[in-house]
Amino acid sequence: MKNLVAGYLVIALGILTASAQQKTVKYGLLQMLADKQLDVQNREASPLQIADKTGVKLSARENDGVAWLNGVTFSNGIIELDIKGKDVLQQSFVGVAFHGTGVANTEDVIYFRQFNFRAADPVRRIHAVQYVSLPNYDWEILREKHNGQYEKAIEPAPKADEWFHAKIVVEYPQVKVFVNGNPKASLEVKMLSTTKTGKLGLWVGNNSDGEFANLTVTNKP
């Protein structure tokens, strides 16, 4: 009996320890913008509040842009948020940057090409969600050397000009991307960077704007 009780105590302590190590935080992007807690680079950020979507919008401009969350460090865990781009060819690259080093354009990124979500061309459709590790492994290098490995289609595909929910699970060196609650990952890859922790931000690509809302982050050991 004593052994049984001791076993239960060990299990309970393990559960409590695991729970203590995991922490889920909901980031109020709208308030962070107002409080100047977003470090916006190569973009303008404006408040966004539409129905259940409260967050920020990043403007369009040449080259990549990012809004880093000041004071937020992310290593392993789950990043969830709502994203909206647009159905304009080559002008909607919207996603999340993580493990940022503080050096410009040096981070891992998961991003979406909304204009490819439901494209009639099947080749374009498989370019819907992308992983890159900047600056060494951008999409061009990965497509040339590892075609079809670091970018995939999304099934079922959201509409290109509507909000969708993204869940990014990082367990270094693996990263998985789930869309709109689908239990099957749309993308699952081994990360190419050796950086295991760093800054977290909202990311947009060349000539792209983007809208972001309802960001939550669960940090795991």
Image: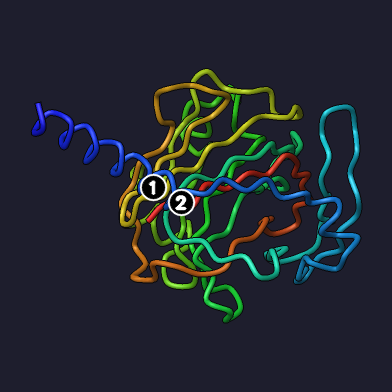
Q: Given contact means CB atoms under 8 Å apart, are the residues at marks 2 and 1 in contact?
A: yes
Relative placement, left or right, of 219 versus 114 is left
Relative placement, left or right, of 201 versus 124 is right
Q: Amino acid at mark 1?
A: Val
Give the labeled residue for mark 1.
175
Give the labeled residue for mark 2.
131
The residue sitting at 78% across, 49% down in the picture is 28
Nearest the viewer among 176 and 158 is 176
Relative placement, left or right, of 212 versus 194 is right
Nearest the viewer among 36 and 210 is 36
Q: Position of residue 180 (x, y in %)?
A: 58, 24
**Mark 2 and mark 1: Cα distance apart in space:** 9 Å
Task: Name the secondary structure under disc 1.
Answer: strand
Q: Is residue 190 above or below residue 6?
A: below
Nearest the viewer among 195 and 105 is 195
The residue sitting at 66% across, 35% down in the picture is 115
